[in-house]
Amino acid sequence: MSLRLRVLNLVEIVLRVPPLFVIDEILKVGIGIHEFDHDITNFAVEEKYDKNDGNGQNFTTAIPYNPVFYRFVLIGLIRLLLSAVGCGVALCLFMLNTKHLMIVYMYFMSVGVVFVSYWTNVSTVKLLINTIQSKNATWDFLTDFFFLDYKTLITEDGVAIQLFQNCMFQAILAFIFINIHLGPRYSVLQKFLPLTFFTPIILTLLPIPLPPVLLSHAPVFCALLPLALVKFVLWSSIVSIIQTMYSGYLHARNFVSNFGMSALVEAEWLRLNVPEVLRTFWLLRVMEHMGIFFMSGYWDQQDGYSPYFRLMKYLMVTGCDTVSAVLGITSIVSYICSYIGKFFQWILLTDDNDKNIGTVSAIVFYILALQTGLTGLEPELRFVRLCRNFGLLFTAILHFIHNVVNPLLMSLSASHNPSLRRHIHALLVCVVLVVLPLILMFYLWSTQETSTWLLAVTAFSIEVIVKVFVSLAIYTLFLMDARRETFWEKLDDYIYYIRAFGNTIEFCFGIFLFFNGAWILLFESGSAIRAVMMCIHAYFNIWCDAKAGWSVFMKRRTAVNKIESLPEAEEDQLRDLDDVCAICYQEMRSAKITRCRHFFHGVCLRKWLYVQDRCPLCHEILHGMDAEDKKDHGPPVEPIEEDNGDR
């Protein structure tokens, strides 16, 4: 990518960051919900009062009508509505095309220039009026200026300096407004516009003083012309704005009808550069809070901790206090984890782009943040919870790295790959996947108290260690089979037993994590998101795994029973046949004879029965043929040369 394209891409990303800051500020005040709940709670308590029934007994009743209470309810609803509208407008701005987004920013900048000019003129005019009134005479500023009496000008209570600064500032604002306003650009109007920015100062400096009331209102009248241009642009563009919104709706509807909603989301995700925008937003937000940290004096605070630790803790706590901030830190986590995945892929000498560790890590981290209620916690609890979420994310990354190295190990061993370097790299990654969980468990169990979170991290760590040993065991069996000169019939059984052991351990840990999560849901921090995630975990990781494992077990058991019912080939039959197995093309030192008189390895035939119950050569039913079937099919067929040719 050229430098020009990179700069344009960066500019487009920066343009989409301000709407996120608007949403973030709205979320910081809680959209009015927290204050609304607080007010309702207070009024619910205050609406009850004690009343004596005449017998000396007090009872509590509720006031039937309280206008103040309903006023607070109405204010809360209005705040909620305005906040929702603000978030919606910010999201619409975020999704605009770059061209339309530039137009919106130019409009807001022109409005901002007008109001900034008005405020600076008001403050300067007020200062000049006070100066004139304090002297009880006409201020001879122009006389001092024309006679070059700079000493008087400078010592005139700083008024001359402020006047000069305001004039320079108004010149800059006038230049900006003339070049960015979207109104009609008539030549006379363009020449007259700069005068409106300087008119309040000029009226104040006239030799014949004007009434203070007129001077105080001069900035308002002078700002009317720029504001009229701004309003004219807004009202004249309403039709085009509606047409643009409608055309965008039509485009989205046609896209969904042709390609589907998921394709639309993916296309918009790429067009808006959402991950890059979120990362830029979060980094700018961190820089803002870093400035607040230093200006507030937290760096020099004496609390027994290092200032760097306080800074890191402060940035982590304030970096995930809203949903938008959590999205930003999730994008940062995804970016870092993607490079971790690329690092391990570089070590393994592989390039598997389908397995993007960054995407998986982002999903895991965001789900953890939602189900633990990260944004609603107090600062200290939020810091602890964030550190714990990073611990769980670390174990998830280890599982993902195992998912990358496991197929590579199987491929290297099964394909008899002679590259010793690739074998060593894969084994080194397996060693890392065993050592890191052990170090993590040793550190946590020696420094942390026993908790549900610690049990969950331990379960995930032990699970990844078990997975690595299962992969290494199967890898070793494949290497041993590669060195054998004859067919190893028991290899499939050994692999099945090892995998069944590993799957059983994973299933047990899945049940343990379900009960661990149920304990957290009932007694620690219950939430709807956690309940939903537990249901998903129970269905996919427990029910579906148990159902799939039982199905495999029953298929294998049925296939074994069918194979055992077939006769075993004798040595003289194998010698007379002098052929290979038609399934694996390996020499047959032992074989099973089907009802259609074909010879196969017992293990190969068992694998074939997992798929279908017919002979691989003649497609006759291998098992369960009754007498009527035998009559229809005729006498058994002896193996002849044509059969060998078919194989």
Image (cartoon, rainbow, N blue to C red):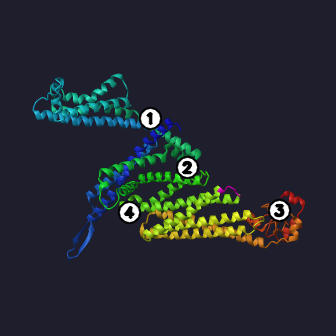
The residues tagged by marks 3 and 2 sit, at their Cα atoms, a distance apart of 50 Å
**Magenta stretch contains residue 284:** no
- Tag on residue 381? 4
Residue 609 showing in the rendered view: yes
Mark 1 highlights which residue? 240
The residues tagged by marks 3 and 1 sit, at their Cα atoms, a distance apart of 77 Å
Q: Which structural element holds mark 2?
A: helix
Q: Which structural element holds mark 3?
A: loop
In this view, the residue farthest toward the bottom is 55
Amino acid identity at mark 1: Ser
| Horizontal side of residue 550 vs 360, given as left or right | right
Looking at the image, residue 215 lies above or below residue 588: above
Please tell me how crowded label 1 is: few (under 14), some (14-19), or many (20+) other residues with Cα within 10 Å: few
- Tag on residue 580? 3
The residues tagged by marks 4 and 3 sit, at their Cα atoms, a distance apart of 68 Å
Q: Are marks 3 and 1 in contact (CB under 8 Å)?
A: no
Front tag of 3 and 2: 3
Front tag of 4 and 3: 3
Q: Are marks 3 and 2 in contact (CB under 8 Å)?
A: no
Residue 129, picture quadrant = top left
Amino acid identity at mark 3: Val
* x and y, in percent, of residue 42 in the image: 28, 62
- Magenta stretch? 416-420
